[in-house]
Image (cartoon, grey):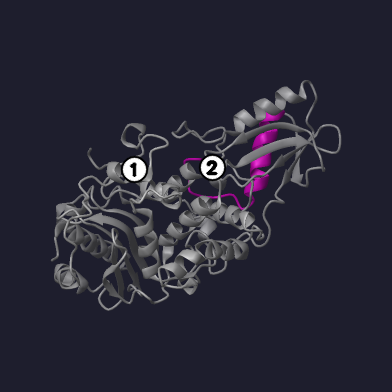
Amino acid sequence: MTLRGDGSASERPDAGATAPAVREALLPEVRDDAPAPTAAGLQAAITLTLADPAINGRLAVSVVDAHSGEPVLERGADALLVPASTAKIATAVAALTALPQDLRLTTRVVAGAAPGEVVLVGGGDPTLAGVKAPLSYPAPARLTDLATRTRAALGAQVVSRVLVDESLYSGARLGPGWKDSYVTEGAVAPVGPVMVDGGRVRPDRVRRHLEPALAAGQQLAALLQPGAEVQVARGAAPVGATELGAVTSQPVPQLVERMLAHSDNDLAEALARHVALSQGQPASFAGGAAAVQQVLGSFLDEVGVGRQAVALVDGSGLSRDDRLEPAALTRLLARVASDDGSAPVEQLSPVLTGLPVAGFSGTLSERYRKAATGARLGAGIVRAKTGTLNGVSALAGLVRTADGRLLAFDLTADGVPLGANRQAEAALDRLAAALAGCGCR
């Protein structure tokens, strides 16, 4: 099977496939009996690239043999660094561990307390698609379907008021350590349990609504009572209110895949909050961070990196206050790629299927394609999550060596010179490609 992975159904393993089957399909030619690389061999393979001015002296390296779980080469791997979006791997593992595999996030409309009043109740689904959203696969919940079901339940009743219930979440809507411009730049919407098209002003635009919940309520009002003036405001659903309509997201495994492939910040924050709810924590930034660490804690203790190795303050990695040891991510990735068939590993396979494929899918679709970059050898072989903030460039994932051995790796450059992020990305791509191209014995 060709290793591509652009998300099409024909290239993905069958639904319900076991973890070893997923591993075999997505990582062809991996052989656990292949010779493992040595630290000296790896060091020799990457020495020239390590001298790149964009990463020289700033790069932490963790390379782990995915079969044995043992480190092969580590340098600065136990330092708490700003992970950027590679933090989404930790969020993904926590979500798949803590949440039921069949959990779908439900957006509902219920009857309000007064005649003509309905309440849009957020269930934390940022993938809810609006009127102008194109069809996509896998299909998200759609606001038009919710409106159609609600209208049918209402019959001839006129809707004069739409309330929006955001009570599922609590706390601040912008994360600690976030830039004020993240919303206006389109990196993320203000975090809340009700939004349409990820809070975007249009599905084909990056700019976000400052009040995504009210914007969702206005879209719903226009669908329920076209051409009429309908008041939209925040409010709470009455206790025991009659449900008028509901739509559900894709199940958690598909949400995790989407979050990783496209580095979806809104989805990462939503999943972290649902992990918080599962652990009895408030659905807030602090609750999500505490819950992710709680869920991952026993595993981190087991592999010897300790719970302090994951110190996140959000679910997306957007915060400059996030800290994560590269050694923790490589151990998590090695666990994801394990072929022991155990239940914990089985449910983690969406991390593997969600990792972008170098040169083909997600945030790596445009990287590794040009021979001039020196990274072309990694195309189709490296599967990794990217991470980028000003001054930070990271890449963490899995790669098959020339001998067929599977490695988990984390390459995090913290302190990249201003304006040199592109050069740092290229250097990390060359490093990962070097791992793919050598036996390194």
The amino acid marked with disc number 2 is Thr
Which residue is the site of mark 2?
127
Displayed quadrant of residue 111: top right
The N terminus: image quadrant? top left
Precedes in sequence: disc 2 or disc 1: 1
Q: Is residue 151 left or right of residue 322?
A: right
* Position in image of residue 343 (x %, y %): 45, 49
Q: Which residues are magenta?
A: 200-227
Residue most extreme to the right: 114
The amino acid marked with disc number 1 is Val
Q: Which mark is residue 120?
A: none
Q: Nearer the viewer, residue 265 or 189?
A: 265
- In whole angstroms, how far apart are the C-alphas of marks 2 and 1? 25 Å
Residue most extreme to the top: 156
Q: Is residue 227 visible?
A: no
* Position in image of residue 272 (x %, y %): 55, 56
Cβ atoms at labels 2 and 1 below 8 Å apart:
no
What crowding class fits label 2: few (fewer than 14 Cα within 10 Å), some (14-19), or many (20 or more)? many
Displayed quadrant of residue 258: top left
Tell me the mark number nearer the camera, choosing from 2 and 1: 1
* Position in image of residue 60 (x %, y %): 31, 73
Q: Is residue 335 left or right of residue 230?
A: left
The C terminus: image quadrant? bottom left
Q: Is residue 280 visible?
A: yes
Which residue is the site of mark 1?
22
